Amino acid sequence: MIDTGKCLKLAQVNLGISSVELAKRADSTPQQVVRWRAQANMKIHTIDKICRAMDLSIYDFLLYQKIETPN
């Protein structure tokens, strides 16, 4: 299974988008972004909302699952 929270964290780091900035772009709150980052599984409409805010395709967003995180 794809960990979408991990994808979000890595996409934010790679694109240099803070949680506050993402919240503004997604018309949400920083607290909600924190919840998204902690979720391993998200509904497709949530992923779509995040991807639109980050100007990413869903495919590219999910590819972040393949990136290894440092220990």
Image: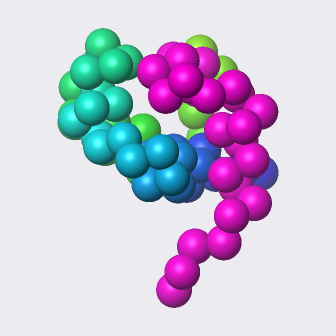
The foreground one among 51 and 2 is: 51
From this viewpoint, is residue 39 visible?
no
Quarter-of-image position of residue 27 = top left
39 relative to 65 in the view: left or right: left
Q: Is residue 16 above or below residue 23?
A: below
- Give the vertical position of 55 relative to 2 (above or below): above
Occupied quadrant, residue 59: top right
Q: Is residue 66 above or below residue 23?
A: below
Outermost residue to the bottom: 71
Q: Position of residue 34 (x, y in %)?
A: 31, 44
Magenta residue span: 47-71
56 displayed left or right of 20: right
Spot occupied by residue 46 in the image (x, y as percentages of width and height) = 53, 22
At horizontal 42% and vertical 39% (from top left) the residue drawn is: 36
Residue at the image point whose x is 66% and y is 72% from the top:
68
- Give the image location of residue 45, x and y in percent: 59, 15
Secondary structure of the magenta portion, mostly?
helix
How many dots with numbers?
0
Q: Position of residue 6 (x, y in %)?
A: 55, 55
Task: Report if residue 53 lies within the magenta region.
Answer: yes
Instruction: Specify the color scheme.
Output: rainbow
Which residue appears at 51% of the width and 86% of the height? 71
- Taking the image as drawn, is residue 6 in sight? yes
Q: Residue at x 34, y 30 (%)?
A: 22
Compare residues 66 and 43 and report the one nearer the observer.
66
Residue 24 lies in quadrant: top left
Is residue 31 magenta-colored? no
Q: Is 71 placed left or right of 61 in the picture? A: left
